[in-house]
């Protein structure tokens, strides 16, 4: 059994260099006959609502995923806080779609996979906002809003995000985020037992052996780390993107 998990790629356009690296990963997964691929949210900087323009503007991404799925790899997408209300888009190419999380059992172990925003502690105002955004009215609204202003908004937010990310990954702030998420997964583990908890959202790469008896991984921010998480032969490894080149 082998699978890949990735999140927080934050593709900002079809010319984003990280997109080509992602396509290389998909092609490697196809060649290796990977069992499963988990996309744990924020794959794009902004993708909201079931607009078919996304399939056209990011044709390389969706077509390569479709090829992978048709070859037998099970692909799961879990909503992030930058890409949501996209069920029809992903289901059209044959992917499995999840609003909050996905659970599986592999090799006798229990796994929990999610974006991570709903697990994070000290996040009350955000959770209220997300509950509003996820109500059925807002989901329908996202599908009928014109694509052009959404696309323009996404580009503006992407530019602001890149400026913010260029200064945010200082060691002190990253350590605080890491500690917050470790505290968050420890609290979450009291609700239900898992052997592994795999998240994104924090943008801080992490592997944590909890004293509560589980292991937590965070995918980090792919554009900075250039790594994604591979599970193979019963072991996890953060793997350099360069390893997936043919």
Image (tube, helix red, strand yellow):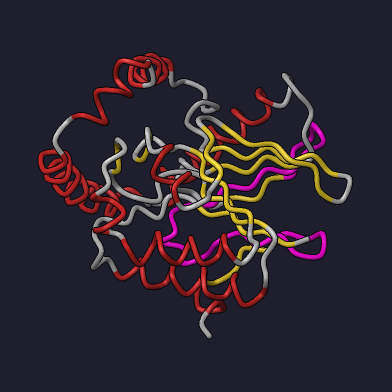
Side of 204 where 59 appears, left or right: left
In magenta segment, residue 31: no
Quadrant in the picture for residue 102: top right
User: Is the N terminus in the top left, top right, bottom left or bottom right quadrant?
Assistant: bottom right
Side of 102 where 192 appears, left or right: right
Residue 126 horizontal/vertical position (percent): 37, 21
**Residue lying farthest to the bottom in this orientation:** 246
Q: Is residue 175 above or below residue 71?
A: above
Q: Is residue 126 above or below residue 168?
A: above
**Residue at horizontal 51%, vertical 28%?**
120
Looking at this view, is 210 or 136 the one in front? 136
**Residue at horizontal 30%, vertical 70%?**
17
Total of numbered circles in the picture? 0
**Residue at horizontal 23%, vertical 50%?**
53
Q: Which residues are magenta?
A: 209-236
**Residue at horizontal 34%, vertical 52%?**
10
Residue 46 horizontal/vertical position (percent): 28, 43
Side of 160 where 16 appears, left or right: right
Looking at this view, is 56 or 156 the one in front? 56
In magenta segment, residue 212: yes
Q: Is residue 84 above or below residue 15?
A: above
Side of 145 where 43 appears, left or right: right
Looking at this view, is 184 or 230 the one in front? 230
Residue 141 horizontal/vertical position (percent): 24, 23
């Amino acid at each position: 059994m082998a699978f890949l998990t990735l999140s927080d790629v934050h593709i900002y356009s079809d010319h984003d260099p990280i997109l080509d690296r992602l396509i290389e990963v998909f092609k490697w997964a196809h060649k290796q006959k990977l069992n499963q691929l988990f996309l744990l949210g924020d794959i794009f900087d902004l993708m909201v609502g079931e607009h078919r323009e996304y399939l056209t503007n990011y044709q390389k991404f969706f077509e390569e995923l479709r090829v992978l799925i048709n070859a037998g790899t099970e692909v799961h997408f879990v909503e992030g806080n930058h890409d949501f209300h996209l069920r029809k888009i992903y289901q059209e190419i044959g992917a499995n779609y999840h609003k909050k999380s996905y659970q599986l059992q592999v090799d006798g172990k229990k796994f929990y996979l999610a974006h991570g925003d709903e697990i994070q502690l000290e996040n009350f105002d955000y959770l209220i906002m997300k509950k509003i955004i996820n109500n059925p009215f807002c989901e329908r609204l996202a599908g009928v809003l014109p694509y052009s202003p959404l696309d323009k908004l996404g580009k503006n937010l992407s530019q602001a995000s890149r400026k913010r990310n260029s200064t945010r990954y200082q060691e002190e702030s990253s350590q605080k985020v890491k500690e917050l998420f470790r505290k968050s997964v420890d609290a979450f583990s009291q609700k239900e037992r898992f052997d592994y908890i795999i998240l994104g959202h924090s943008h801080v790469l992490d592997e944590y052996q909890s004293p509560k008896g589980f292991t937590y991984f965070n995918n980090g921010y792919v554009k900075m780390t250039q790594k994604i998480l591979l599970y193979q032969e019963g072991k996890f490894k953060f793997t350099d993107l360069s390893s997936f080149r043919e």
